[in-house]
Image: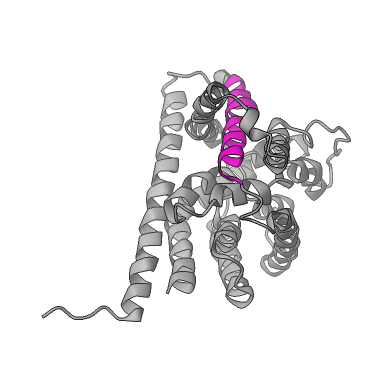
Amino acid sequence: MATPRTDCDGALYNSMNFLFATLEAVVILLGVGVIGFALVARRVVPGAALKALAPLALDVALPCTIFSNITRHFNPSLIPGWWRLPLWWVLFTAAAFLLTFLIRSLFRPAHHEEFAATLFYQNALFFPLVILPRVCDENMPCLVYLFLFVLPFSAFFFKTAPYFFKNSTPSNGWGHILNPAVIATLLAVALRLFDLHTFVPEAAYGIIELLGGMAIPLLMLVIGGNLYIDFKQRRKLPVAEVISFVAAKNLIFPIVALAVLALLRPSYPLALIILLQSAVPPITAMPLMAERAGGDKTVVNQYLLAGFAASIVTLPIMVGLLGLLYRG
Protein backbone atom coordinates (compact mmCIF):
# COMPACT_ATOMS: atom_id res chain seq x y z
CA MET A 1 0.00 0.00 0.00
CA ALA A 2 1.40 3.42 -0.98
CA THR A 3 2.24 5.78 1.83
CA PRO A 4 0.29 9.08 1.56
CA ARG A 5 2.46 12.08 0.85
CA THR A 6 2.55 14.44 3.83
CA ASP A 7 2.77 18.24 3.72
CA CYS A 8 6.46 17.92 4.52
CA ASP A 9 6.91 15.53 1.58
CA GLY A 10 5.09 17.95 -0.72
CA ALA A 11 7.26 20.85 0.41
CA LEU A 12 10.39 18.82 -0.23
CA TYR A 13 9.05 17.75 -3.64
CA ASN A 14 8.41 21.37 -4.65
CA SER A 15 11.78 22.46 -3.34
CA MET A 16 13.59 19.74 -5.30
CA ASN A 17 11.68 20.71 -8.44
CA PHE A 18 12.89 24.30 -8.10
CA LEU A 19 16.41 23.12 -7.34
CA PHE A 20 16.67 20.94 -10.44
CA ALA A 21 14.95 23.49 -12.69
CA THR A 22 17.44 26.13 -11.58
CA LEU A 23 20.35 23.73 -11.95
CA GLU A 24 19.23 23.01 -15.50
CA ALA A 25 19.04 26.73 -16.29
CA VAL A 26 22.49 27.41 -14.82
CA VAL A 27 24.01 24.49 -16.73
CA ILE A 28 22.43 25.74 -19.97
CA LEU A 29 23.76 29.24 -19.39
CA LEU A 30 27.24 28.14 -18.47
CA GLY A 31 27.22 25.53 -21.24
CA VAL A 32 26.69 28.22 -23.87
CA GLY A 33 29.35 30.31 -22.12
CA VAL A 34 31.78 27.38 -22.29
CA ILE A 35 31.16 27.13 -26.04
CA GLY A 36 32.01 30.83 -26.36
CA PHE A 37 35.10 30.23 -24.22
CA ALA A 38 36.17 27.35 -26.49
CA LEU A 39 35.47 29.24 -29.73
CA VAL A 40 37.82 32.04 -28.71
CA ALA A 41 40.37 29.68 -27.16
CA ARG A 42 40.58 27.67 -30.40
CA ARG A 43 40.55 30.89 -32.44
CA VAL A 44 37.42 29.89 -34.35
CA VAL A 45 36.18 33.35 -33.39
CA PRO A 46 38.85 36.02 -32.91
CA GLY A 47 38.74 37.86 -29.63
CA ALA A 48 38.40 41.16 -31.47
CA ALA A 49 35.07 39.98 -32.92
CA LEU A 50 33.54 40.06 -29.44
CA LYS A 51 33.65 43.85 -29.55
CA ALA A 52 31.30 43.74 -32.53
CA LEU A 53 29.04 41.01 -31.14
CA ALA A 54 28.53 42.67 -27.74
CA PRO A 55 26.65 45.73 -29.12
CA LEU A 56 24.53 43.41 -31.28
CA ALA A 57 23.54 41.50 -28.16
CA LEU A 58 23.12 44.44 -25.78
CA ASP A 59 21.81 47.16 -28.10
CA VAL A 60 19.66 45.11 -30.51
CA ALA A 61 18.72 41.61 -29.30
CA LEU A 62 18.24 42.38 -25.59
CA PRO A 63 15.99 45.45 -26.15
CA CYS A 64 13.92 43.35 -28.57
CA THR A 65 13.31 40.58 -26.03
CA ILE A 66 12.44 43.18 -23.36
CA PHE A 67 10.02 44.99 -25.69
CA SER A 68 8.28 41.82 -26.87
CA ASN A 69 7.89 40.35 -23.37
CA ILE A 70 6.45 43.52 -21.86
CA THR A 71 4.08 44.31 -24.73
CA ARG A 72 2.88 40.69 -24.86
CA HIS A 73 2.57 39.92 -21.15
CA PHE A 74 2.36 43.17 -19.16
CA ASN A 75 -1.21 43.95 -18.12
CA PRO A 76 -1.34 46.94 -15.73
CA SER A 77 -4.80 45.98 -14.48
CA LEU A 78 -3.51 42.57 -13.35
CA ILE A 79 -0.36 44.01 -11.74
CA PRO A 80 -1.74 47.12 -9.98
CA GLY A 81 1.45 47.73 -8.01
CA TRP A 82 3.81 47.36 -10.99
CA TRP A 83 5.24 50.85 -10.45
CA ARG A 84 6.55 49.75 -7.05
CA LEU A 85 8.96 47.24 -8.60
CA PRO A 86 11.74 49.80 -9.29
CA LEU A 87 11.23 51.03 -5.71
CA TRP A 88 11.82 47.49 -4.46
CA TRP A 89 15.04 47.54 -6.46
CA VAL A 90 16.07 50.73 -4.63
CA LEU A 91 15.45 49.05 -1.26
CA PHE A 92 17.32 45.92 -2.35
CA THR A 93 20.27 47.95 -3.60
CA ALA A 94 20.46 50.01 -0.41
CA ALA A 95 20.48 46.83 1.69
CA ALA A 96 23.10 45.23 -0.59
CA PHE A 97 25.28 48.33 -0.28
CA LEU A 98 25.19 48.19 3.52
CA LEU A 99 25.87 44.44 3.53
CA THR A 100 28.77 44.87 1.09
CA PHE A 101 30.60 47.31 3.33
CA LEU A 102 29.81 45.34 6.47
CA ILE A 103 31.35 42.23 4.88
CA ARG A 104 34.33 44.19 3.61
CA SER A 105 34.94 45.55 7.11
CA LEU A 106 34.74 42.08 8.63
CA PHE A 107 36.81 40.22 6.02
CA ARG A 108 39.37 43.00 5.40
CA PRO A 109 40.46 41.72 1.96
CA ALA A 110 43.79 42.90 0.57
CA HIS A 111 42.13 44.21 -2.61
CA HIS A 112 39.27 45.93 -0.83
CA GLU A 113 38.15 48.13 -3.73
CA GLU A 114 37.90 45.26 -6.20
CA PHE A 115 36.34 43.00 -3.56
CA ALA A 116 33.58 45.46 -2.68
CA ALA A 117 32.75 46.46 -6.27
CA THR A 118 32.57 42.88 -7.55
CA LEU A 119 30.52 41.84 -4.53
CA PHE A 120 28.01 44.68 -4.85
CA TYR A 121 27.13 44.59 -8.57
CA GLN A 122 25.29 41.43 -9.56
CA ASN A 123 24.49 39.84 -12.92
CA ALA A 124 21.07 41.44 -12.70
CA LEU A 125 19.50 40.35 -15.97
CA PHE A 126 21.12 37.50 -17.89
CA PHE A 127 20.94 34.72 -15.29
CA PRO A 128 17.38 35.56 -14.14
CA LEU A 129 16.29 35.81 -17.79
CA VAL A 130 16.94 32.08 -18.25
CA ILE A 131 16.04 30.85 -14.76
CA LEU A 132 12.68 32.59 -14.26
CA PRO A 133 10.71 30.81 -17.02
CA ARG A 134 11.74 27.46 -15.54
CA VAL A 135 10.65 28.12 -11.96
CA CYS A 136 7.63 30.42 -12.44
CA ASP A 137 4.11 29.25 -13.18
CA GLU A 138 2.92 30.02 -16.70
CA ASN A 139 0.31 32.50 -15.44
CA MET A 140 2.96 34.53 -13.58
CA PRO A 141 4.52 37.30 -15.72
CA CYS A 142 7.89 36.85 -14.03
CA LEU A 143 9.94 38.30 -16.89
CA VAL A 144 7.82 41.46 -16.83
CA TYR A 145 8.50 41.73 -13.09
CA LEU A 146 12.20 41.29 -13.81
CA PHE A 147 12.43 43.98 -16.52
CA LEU A 148 10.57 46.51 -14.39
CA PHE A 149 12.56 45.62 -11.26
CA VAL A 150 15.98 46.07 -12.89
CA LEU A 151 14.98 49.14 -14.92
CA PRO A 152 17.36 51.49 -13.03
CA PHE A 153 20.23 48.98 -12.78
CA SER A 154 22.29 49.65 -15.91
CA ALA A 155 22.29 53.42 -15.45
CA PHE A 156 23.10 52.97 -11.76
CA PHE A 157 25.99 50.61 -12.51
CA PHE A 158 27.73 52.81 -15.06
CA LYS A 159 27.24 55.95 -12.97
CA THR A 160 28.27 54.61 -9.56
CA ALA A 161 30.79 51.78 -10.13
CA PRO A 162 33.75 54.14 -10.71
CA TYR A 163 33.28 55.58 -7.21
CA PHE A 164 34.45 52.28 -5.70
CA PHE A 165 37.95 53.03 -7.03
CA LYS A 166 39.85 55.99 -5.61
CA ASN A 167 41.74 56.68 -8.87
CA SER A 168 38.61 56.82 -11.02
CA THR A 169 37.18 59.73 -13.01
CA PRO A 170 33.38 59.22 -13.16
CA SER A 171 31.63 60.12 -16.41
CA ASN A 172 29.01 62.85 -16.57
CA GLY A 173 27.41 61.65 -19.83
CA TRP A 174 23.83 60.43 -20.28
CA GLY A 175 24.55 57.66 -22.78
CA HIS A 176 24.39 54.84 -20.24
CA ILE A 177 21.21 56.19 -18.63
CA LEU A 178 19.12 56.25 -21.80
CA ASN A 179 20.51 53.03 -23.24
CA PRO A 180 18.50 50.86 -25.68
CA ALA A 181 17.33 48.44 -22.96
CA VAL A 182 15.92 51.29 -20.83
CA ILE A 183 14.29 52.91 -23.87
CA ALA A 184 12.71 49.58 -24.89
CA THR A 185 11.32 49.11 -21.36
CA LEU A 186 9.84 52.61 -21.13
CA LEU A 187 8.37 52.44 -24.65
CA ALA A 188 6.78 49.03 -24.06
CA VAL A 189 5.29 50.12 -20.71
CA ALA A 190 3.88 53.28 -22.31
CA LEU A 191 2.30 51.28 -25.15
CA ARG A 192 0.59 48.97 -22.66
CA LEU A 193 -0.54 51.76 -20.33
CA PHE A 194 -2.28 53.61 -23.17
CA ASP A 195 -3.43 50.45 -25.01
CA LEU A 196 -1.39 51.37 -28.06
CA HIS A 197 0.30 47.98 -28.32
CA THR A 198 -2.61 46.72 -30.45
CA PHE A 199 -1.53 49.08 -33.23
CA VAL A 200 1.84 47.33 -33.58
CA PRO A 201 1.58 44.99 -36.61
CA GLU A 202 2.04 41.27 -35.97
CA ALA A 203 4.78 41.24 -38.60
CA ALA A 204 6.68 43.81 -36.51
CA TYR A 205 6.24 41.64 -33.41
CA GLY A 206 7.53 38.67 -35.39
CA ILE A 207 10.69 40.53 -36.39
CA ILE A 208 11.24 41.83 -32.86
CA GLU A 209 10.74 38.40 -31.28
CA LEU A 210 13.05 36.77 -33.82
CA LEU A 211 15.79 39.27 -33.02
CA GLY A 212 15.10 38.95 -29.30
CA GLY A 213 15.59 35.20 -29.51
CA MET A 214 19.28 35.82 -30.16
CA ALA A 215 19.78 37.72 -26.91
CA ILE A 216 20.61 34.98 -24.41
CA PRO A 217 22.77 32.70 -26.59
CA LEU A 218 24.62 35.66 -28.08
CA LEU A 219 25.19 37.25 -24.68
CA MET A 220 26.51 34.04 -23.17
CA LEU A 221 28.80 33.39 -26.15
CA VAL A 222 30.23 36.88 -25.71
CA ILE A 223 30.55 36.41 -21.94
CA GLY A 224 32.29 33.04 -22.42
CA GLY A 225 34.70 34.53 -24.95
CA ASN A 226 35.48 37.46 -22.70
CA LEU A 227 36.06 35.11 -19.76
CA TYR A 228 38.68 33.29 -21.83
CA ILE A 229 40.46 36.56 -22.63
CA ASP A 230 40.30 37.52 -18.95
CA PHE A 231 41.39 34.01 -17.91
CA LYS A 232 44.64 34.39 -19.83
CA GLN A 233 45.38 37.56 -17.88
CA ARG A 234 44.50 36.14 -14.47
CA ARG A 235 46.77 36.43 -11.49
CA LYS A 236 46.85 33.88 -8.70
CA LEU A 237 45.29 35.24 -5.53
CA PRO A 238 45.56 33.74 -2.05
CA VAL A 239 43.04 30.91 -1.75
CA ALA A 240 41.65 32.39 1.47
CA GLU A 241 40.74 35.64 -0.29
CA VAL A 242 38.91 33.85 -3.10
CA ILE A 243 37.08 31.64 -0.60
CA SER A 244 36.08 34.75 1.37
CA PHE A 245 34.62 36.29 -1.77
CA VAL A 246 32.67 33.15 -2.70
CA ALA A 247 31.38 32.84 0.88
CA ALA A 248 30.16 36.43 0.79
CA LYS A 249 28.74 36.55 -2.73
CA ASN A 250 27.34 33.04 -3.13
CA LEU A 251 26.32 32.26 0.45
CA ILE A 252 25.98 35.25 2.80
CA PHE A 253 24.11 37.50 0.35
CA PRO A 254 21.37 34.98 -0.57
CA ILE A 255 21.05 33.66 2.99
CA VAL A 256 20.43 37.19 4.27
CA ALA A 257 17.94 37.71 1.44
CA LEU A 258 16.10 34.51 2.37
CA ALA A 259 15.88 35.63 6.00
CA VAL A 260 14.45 39.02 5.00
CA LEU A 261 11.99 37.44 2.55
CA ALA A 262 10.81 35.05 5.27
CA LEU A 263 9.93 38.09 7.39
CA LEU A 264 8.42 40.34 4.69
CA ARG A 265 6.73 37.63 2.59
CA PRO A 266 6.28 39.63 -0.65
CA SER A 267 4.56 37.97 -3.62
CA TYR A 268 6.36 34.90 -4.96
CA PRO A 269 7.48 36.43 -8.30
CA LEU A 270 8.96 39.43 -6.48
CA ALA A 271 10.58 37.22 -3.82
CA LEU A 272 12.12 35.03 -6.52
CA ILE A 273 13.56 38.04 -8.34
CA ILE A 274 15.00 39.49 -5.12
CA LEU A 275 16.56 36.14 -4.23
CA LEU A 276 18.07 35.76 -7.70
CA GLN A 277 19.51 39.26 -7.54
CA SER A 278 21.23 38.31 -4.30
CA ALA A 279 22.42 34.87 -5.44
CA VAL A 280 23.61 35.32 -9.05
CA PRO A 281 27.33 35.79 -9.88
CA PRO A 282 28.89 39.25 -10.34
CA ILE A 283 28.16 41.38 -13.38
CA THR A 284 30.47 40.41 -16.24
CA ALA A 285 31.22 44.03 -17.15
CA MET A 286 33.06 44.49 -13.84
CA PRO A 287 36.59 43.67 -15.12
CA LEU A 288 36.31 46.29 -17.86
CA MET A 289 34.85 48.83 -15.44
CA ALA A 290 37.64 48.15 -12.92
CA GLU A 291 40.28 48.65 -15.60
CA ARG A 292 38.75 51.97 -16.71
CA ALA A 293 38.44 53.15 -13.10
CA GLY A 294 42.05 52.40 -12.19
CA GLY A 295 41.40 49.13 -10.37
CA ASP A 296 43.10 45.77 -10.81
CA LYS A 297 41.31 43.94 -13.61
CA THR A 298 43.09 40.64 -12.98
CA VAL A 299 41.88 40.52 -9.38
CA VAL A 300 38.30 41.17 -10.48
CA ASN A 301 38.64 38.40 -13.07
CA GLN A 302 39.59 35.95 -10.32
CA TYR A 303 36.58 36.91 -8.22
CA LEU A 304 34.32 36.72 -11.27
CA LEU A 305 35.46 33.24 -12.30
CA ALA A 306 35.16 31.95 -8.73
CA GLY A 307 31.64 33.38 -8.38
CA PHE A 308 30.53 31.81 -11.67
CA ALA A 309 31.96 28.40 -10.76
CA ALA A 310 30.39 28.37 -7.29
CA SER A 311 26.98 29.43 -8.61
CA ILE A 312 26.55 26.03 -10.28
CA VAL A 313 26.02 24.62 -6.78
CA THR A 314 24.85 27.55 -4.66
CA LEU A 315 22.26 29.12 -6.97
CA PRO A 316 20.03 26.03 -7.36
CA ILE A 317 20.21 25.38 -3.62
CA MET A 318 19.08 28.92 -2.78
CA VAL A 319 16.16 28.79 -5.23
CA GLY A 320 15.23 25.39 -3.81
CA LEU A 321 15.16 26.88 -0.31
CA LEU A 322 12.90 29.68 -1.52
CA GLY A 323 10.59 27.09 -3.03
CA LEU A 324 10.50 25.32 0.32
CA LEU A 325 9.66 28.62 2.02
CA TYR A 326 6.89 29.67 -0.39
CA ARG A 327 5.50 26.45 -1.79
CA GLY A 328 5.74 24.27 1.25
Please tell me in which quadrant of the rendered image residue 43 appears.
Answer: top left
Does residue 321 appear in this view?
A: yes
Image point (44%, 70%), residue name: 327
Position of residue 13 measured from the top left corner of the image (x, y, whole percent): 33, 69
Q: Main secondary structure of the magenta part?
A: helix
Of 143 and 32, the residue lying toward us: 143
> Up-down: is 222 above or below 262?
above
7 in relation to 156, above or below: below
Question: Residue 302: in sight, yes or no?
Answer: no
Q: Verify whether residue 104 appears in magenta.
A: no
The stretch of residues the image draws in magenta is 51-74
In which quadrant of the rendered view does residue 135 lie? Answer: bottom left
Point out residue 133 in the picture as x, y percentages from the top left corner: 46, 48
Count of numbered badges drawn on the protein: 0
State the residue at coordinates (61%, 22%): 51
Q: Is residue 36 left or right of residue 198?
A: left
